[in-house]
Image (tube, rainbow, N blue to C red):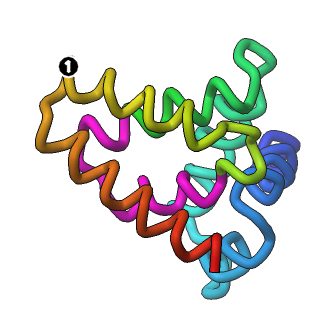
Amino acid sequence: MSERFDEGMKVRREVLGDEWVDKASAGGIDAFQQLITESAWGTVWASDGLARRDRSLVTLALLAGLGNWEELRLHLHACRNTGATREEVLEVFQHVAIYAGVPRANHARKIAKDVWAGQDD
């Protein structure tokens, strides 16, 4: 694997947690896993251009706006590692309501509340 892959795996584990990354790569590192680890995690998330908290909030907005619900759930859990607060997440979803649609934002809020309820138990 490449240096970018190694950096990506480090960042991916820091953001998503070891349990999730181990589960996602349990079948081995195929070409797809290598692609996302190098490009998303080793390039985009590893960049110093935005703080992880900010990158996390941008990611949540994009996932909610596009209706990528499973990834949204994953990145809501990751907020514990990125420093994005619940209040900030709800602010982001207000932005989604205006720029991507109320139904998307409403569903994102529902998922967030479900995730947070599980974390509070």
Residue 100 lies left or right of residue 92; in this view the side is left
- What residue is drawn where x is 13% and y is 30%? 101
Q: Residue furthest top?
A: 49
Which element is circle 1 on?
helix
Which quarter of the picture shows residue 9?
Answer: bottom right
Amino acid on which disc 1 is placed:
Ile
Is 71 one of the magenta-colored residues?
yes
Q: Is residue 39 left or right of residue 104?
A: right
The percent coordinates of residue 110 (x first, y second) are 31, 58
Identify the residue position indicated by label 1 in the image: 98
Q: Is residue 63 magenta?
A: yes
- Range of the magenta residues? 62-78
Toward the viewer: 32 or 49?
49
Q: Where is residue 114 drawn, in percent x and y?
A: 42, 68
Q: Position of residue 21 (x, y in %)?
A: 70, 70
Of the 4 image quadrants, the one containing the N terminus is bottom right
Residue depicted at x 28% and y 28%: 96
Majority SS type along the magenta span: helix
